[in-house]
Amino acid sequence: MPYGRRSYRKKSFRKRRTLAPKSIKRRTSARSQSKQILSLSRRVRSIAKTSYEFITTSYQRDTLPIGNLTGSTVTPYICPLPFAPCDPFGTSPVPLAQRFSDNRVVASQQFMTKKPIFGSSVAARNCGTVHHMGGTLKYQFVTDEPSLTKISVFLIRPKKLTADELTADRTLKNRDGSGSGADGSGAVIYPDIDFHVHSEGGFVGNAGTNFGGMINTKFWDVLYRREIALGSPDGNNIAGNVTGSNTNPANNALIASGTIKLPAGGKMMNVGALTQLTSLDPPVPGPTPAFETQFIDQDNAKSCYLVCLLNDAVVDLETVKMGFVVLDRYKCPV
């Protein structure tokens, strides 16, 4: 172009209608493939997605004494809190699969069983795996002792490293010698080994007031603790001249109530041979509902126990009583 005046073309800011072939292959193809991958992924997820149904079970301890039924030396109250379903629908062929007990085995309630609440489908009841999502324990202590009573309440779980050894040595899943209790009724923990508490006279018993209870955290995980004081020293007859001493109806000198959150137990399966074999001749494997698993089947390292350290013996007919209700929540693939 010769020197001199130059003409400048006005630039257009409109988007180009066509793209270079390389640009088409590089950009459009990559973008379209990405969209296809995302679309296919969504379709696969929707097809393979597992639906879940939630089932809630409940069990309770009546308001009964937690002190020793006989003798003058008080031993800790221990109650297992199974995360296993414990056959709430009553379909297991295993004898007594539903039952578990505390270590008091009061005659009016020698064992506890779980029951389903709020409804459930047949598919959820017969599923092969269940996930325990956690639970809630609501408790209440009531006293008719005019003297001062101290109760140390704990939710404990054996350390993972020694869970199997502790479960066997402390007979946490065994039955007591009387034969009336179910699994868990033989549980025991030892003073100055598993727990320590102040006691008048230098020994753990009913001499004086026990207080300052603590659990050995080398052996046990402590998930909850509370120290409760009950009774009115100014009275000598609980029915005649003792009051609650304050206006709170749930927590006062005669009543103590509270809530404990229970940890999740995780996934469970049923592998029991007796629950799988049918009555055909010869027997053939049948369905394996995970809801038929029982307390003794669950993982020792995830098993929780409610422990109460107290100085109450029921031989004097003046007792400390405790009642509780437990709700467990399960997630079932359907």
Image: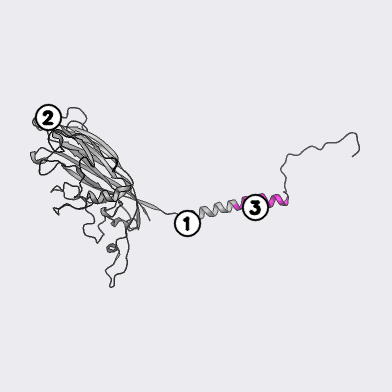
Q: Nearer the viewer, residue 315 or 199?
A: 199
Count how many numbered circles sit on residues in the image: 3
Q: Is residue 193 magenta?
A: no
How would you rate the neighbour count of disc 3 (Cα within 10 Å): few for under 14, some for 14-19, many for 20 or more? few
The residue mark sitting in front, 3 or 1, is 3
**Segment colored magenta:** 14-33
Residue under label 2, please give it: 242
What is the x, y in percent for residue 285? 32, 66
In the image: residue 68, left or right of residue 153: left
Amino acid on which disc 2 is placed: Val
Q: Residue at x 10, y 28 (%)?
A: 235
Q: Is residue 310 visible?
A: yes
Alpha carbon distance from label 1 to label 2: 66 Å
Where 231 falls versus 137 (above or below)? above
x, y (%) of residue 6? 87, 35
Estimate the x, y position of residue 253 in percent, counting from the top left: 17, 31
Quadrant of the rendered structure where residue 217 is? Answer: top left
Give the quarter of the image for residue 197: top left
Q: In the rendered view, would you say 311 is above or below 56?
A: above
